[in-house]
Amino acid sequence: SIVAMTGGMLLLSDDLSQLTSERIRVATRIFPVTGITAVVLDLHSTSVSGIPSLLRLWCTDSLSPDMSFNAVDLASRNSMRASFSPMRPWKNPFSRERNSIPVAKGLGTWSVVSFSNWLDVENIVSVPIISLLPPEITSEKKCDSDELNLGYHVFAFWSSKYIWVSNSKLDGHKTISKRLGPHETEIFHVKPVHASIPQYVGSELHFTCGYEVQSISTTAKSIELQFKNESKRSGFVYLYIPSFSRAIHVTMNRISVRPEIVTRTPQVIRGNITYGGQIIRVYLVMNGSSTDGNVSCQFR
């Protein structure tokens, strides 16, 4: 997680022939590196270990990455954009651009926060929920959640766990906590819930839950994603469907598959309208073929 969140060089010194497939899969889930470095949230209030435990990144589609670049060139461009140069004018310090990872248009903006336990014993790592909220991007259309207070998707990447958090919990005194084992880590993604548009919540493919997406297309009754398919990957893809209907049709690489309903979000009533939906997941397999990596969902 630390290598992933700091965006530096990824070096695997293990004998790969001796590693299990599950351990190799851990490495693939933080590759490619993004070239963007996280902000330390507890720099001046570290735990008894003396090492910061909380790192935060942003992912946003407001920066519009060039998808024609390969992984190495894209990471290089990201790091150049985020670095300081005396030949360039100062950027707006409130734009948070230096810690933002560009993702495909249509994915929106969300925060990525890692919790780490550096101790040799079990420990609870906590952070105020309000510090996890994604920033307001001035060029981005105001989210439905801001107007209707529909809550936030919170997705834990390594454990593949999802929870819905209501806006009422977002005050300066409440925290989100995670009990971690010795030297264990977790990465959380926090994204506003949209009222009427399906959303990509995340996946088991890449720690950012967005950098692995080539393109996304949504309507009121459908969502289609094309994942980057230059390498072999597999894992669950999690989608939010703003409907409680069971009439859901999903295809993976143009083949019909049965989605699994993970959970349903609480119904939120605003006026005479009831909002809410369900989280579904489908297992995606990519074998490195140019025809791989497509997930499509239609619902009523």
Image: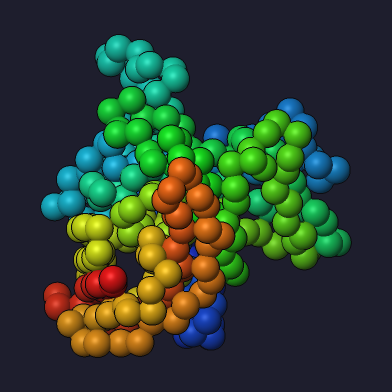
Is residue 279 positioned above or below 76 on the image? below
Where's residue 261, x and y in %?
Answer: 47, 77
Q: Nearer the viewer, residue 194 or 267?
A: 267
What residue lies at 35% left-to-right and 57% top-to-bottom? 199
Residue 285 lies in quadrant: bottom left
Give the residue furthest to the front: 272
Is residue 130 positioned above or below 103 on the image? above
Is residue 98 positioned above or below 223 on the image? above
Q: Nearer the viewer, residue 244 or 249?
A: 244
What residue lies at 37% left-to-right and 39% top-to-bottom? 143
**Visible in this render: residue 12?**
yes
Where's residue 94, x and y in %?
Answer: 44, 20
What residue lies at 70% left-to-right and 31% top-to-bottom? 172
Residue 42 lies in quadrant: top right
Residue 243 lies in quadrant: bottom left
Where's residue 280, x and y in %?
Answer: 43, 73
Q: Quadrant of the N terminus?
A: bottom right
**Visible in this render: residue 8?**
no
In the displayed structure, does residue 46 sit left or right of residue 70? right
Coloring scheme used: rainbow
In the displayed structure, does residue 169 sit left or right of residue 223? right
Is residue 250 positioned above or below 128 on the image? below
What residue lies at 31% left-to-right and 54% top-to-bottom? 197
Q: Quadrant of the C terminus?
A: bottom left
Q: How many marks?
A: 0
